[in-house]
Structures are given as structure tokens and as C-alpha cells.
Image (cartoon, rainbow, N blue to C red):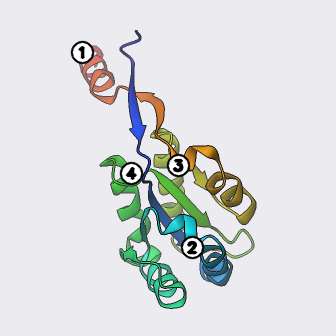
């Protein structure tokens, strides 16, 4: 077995982060409403305004963190690192400049590093949430970060 990689398991109940830029909040709320029967089977969290709006308009319980521009994207990224978020739905607005774009890029990068499924539009979110993997465990390989750090420290 390759000790440079470790296996992580995404459980049957997913920890799903729901995020949307202002211009996409209405679309994400509608998507959540359409998929409420699936989403209610999982733990939901999200950035501040989006989480509150989803809860208010769909009745789904969504644990809110800070608003994206106030560090919410970073909080979600930290939860990925801690193993407490394993699925991200982020309806981003590609036509509007975002003042917290570096935070968004950092979130997307950490999701890639930890091999976290991430959807950035309705079509990819639909494909992901209707996948057979939504109702079962999923094992995936990520870099063995502890070994990587140890190896790097010995060569510096």
C-alpha cells in the first residue's frame, strides 16, 4: 500500500455546505426547496446570509457561519480540513466581481486538496445530489499530510 496516501470516508449522512453569491441566492434557495427531501437526510451548514435565507424559506435546518466577505468561506474551508464538511454546493456568480474573491479561491483550493465534491452551478449540483453515492459511504484517497510534512522537514 502506498503510504503517501490515506483513505478518508464520507459517511452515508453527508455534511453539506451551502453557499451562494448574492446574485445566486434565489437560485440556490429554489434548488434546496426542490431537493428538500434529500437534503433533510444530511447535516447542512452554510455562510451567514445564505444559511439564514435557506432556513427561513425552506424550513431546512442550516447551521450558519459568518457571511462570506466576513470570513464564512474561510470557516467552511477550516471545517473541510477538520473533516466536518465533505460536500460543497456553491452557486457562484461568474458575472459579478466579488470583493472576497481570494477567500473563495482558497475555499475551492482546499476542497480540491481534500478531494471534496464541489458543485458550482445547478447542473453539477443536480448530478451530485442525485448520484447513488448520496445514500452510501464513499472512500477516497488524499495525500498523507503527516508523512508529507515529515518528509519535507527532513529535506529542508
Real-space CA distance between mark 1 and mark 4, rounded to the nearest whole angstrom: 27 Å
Q: Is residue 42 above or below residue 19?
A: above
Disc number lying in front (2 or 1): 2
Residue 99: x and y in percent read 54, 75
Residue tagged by mark 4?
A: 80
**Residue found 44% across the figure and 30% down from its top:** 142
Front residue of 77/138: it is 138
Spot the residue most to the top: 1
Sequence-wise, the earlier of marks 1 and 4 is 4
Say whether disc 4 or disc 2 marks the residue closer to the N-terminus: 2
Q: Position of residue 28 (x, y in %)?
A: 63, 75
Which residue is most to the bottom? 56
Q: Determine whether, in the image, residue 130 is placed left or right of residue 111.
A: right
Say the numbered circle drawn on residue 36.
2
Whichever of labels 2 and 1 marks the residue nearer the N terminus, that label is: 2
> Which sits earlier in the primary sequence, circle 1 or circle 3?
3
Q: Are marks 2 and 1 in contact (CB under 8 Å)?
A: no
Amino acid at each position: 500500500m502506498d503510504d503517501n496516501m490515506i483513505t478518508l470516508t464520507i459517511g452515508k449522512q453527508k455534511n453539506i455546505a451551502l453557499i451562494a453569491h448574492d446574485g445566486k441566492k434565489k437560485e440556490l434557495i429554489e434548488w434546496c426547496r426542490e431537493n428538500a427531501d434529500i437534503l433533510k437526510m444530511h447535516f447542512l451548514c452554510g455562510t451567514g446570509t445564505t444559511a439564514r435565507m435557506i432556513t427561513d424559506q425552506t424550513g431546512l435546518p442550516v447551521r450558519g457561519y459568518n457571511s462570506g466577505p466576513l470570513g464564512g468561506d474561510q470557516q467552511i474551508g477550516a471545517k473541510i480540513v477538520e473533516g466536518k464538511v465533505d460536500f460543497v454546493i456553491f452557486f457562484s456568480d461568474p458575472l459579478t466581481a466579488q470583493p472576497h474573491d481570494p477567500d473563495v479561491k482558497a475555499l475551492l483550493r482546499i476542497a480540491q486538496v481534500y478531494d471534496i465534491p464541489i458543485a458550482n452551478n445547478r447542473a453539477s449540483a443536480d448530478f451530485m445530489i442525485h448520484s447513488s453515492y448520496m445514500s452510501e459511504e464513499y472512500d477516497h484517497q488524499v495525500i498523507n499530510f503527516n508523512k508529507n510534512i515529515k518528509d519535507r522537514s527532513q529535506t529542508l
